[in-house]
Image (cartoon, helix red, strand yellow):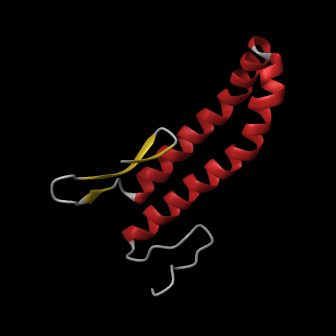
Amino acid sequence: MTYLGNVLASATCTVCGETFRPRPDVLVANYVRDFEHRLARKPGRMLTEARRHPLSFVLHYLPRGLVSKPREVLQELEVLARSNQAEHGTVKDAAGAAPPGR
């Protein structure tokens, strides 16, 4: 199973190997809604963490988040782009380039 945040992007059957995906328009709509929800909740979660563990927040939570979150979002967008392209028969990366040999 592949998730984009909290949204199921695909699931592969362990018996037959077939991959099931939602329609691209449904996947994008659900992902955008989930991303907006996660984005809106982030400041509150950060404030709670800063109040509970101020030193850990400054030394670990914040620096790790500044590095990992943009990468995580980029990975989600790449999966979204691949999923969308798979519906059209060509898998491309987030920059729009097809893998070598395609």
Residue at 23%, 60% in the rendered image: 18
Rendering coords of residue 3 (x, y %): 44, 46
Question: Does 51 sit left or right of 18 as displayed?
Answer: right
Comparing 34 with 4, the one in front is 4
Vertical comparison of 97 with 83: above or below:
below
Residue at 37%, 68% in the rendered image: 87
Vertical comparison of 54 with 84: above or below:
above
Vertical comparison of 62 with 50: above or below:
below
Residue at 44%, 51% in the rendered image: 27
Vertical comparison of 41 with 64: above or below:
above
How many discs appear? 0
Rendering coords of residue 30 (x, y %): 47, 44
Residue at 74%, 46% in the rendered image: 67
Location of the C terminus (image quadrant): bottom left
Comparing 19 with 21, the one in front is 19
Q: Quadrant of residue 41?
A: top right
Question: Does 10 sit left or right of 12 as displayed?
Answer: right
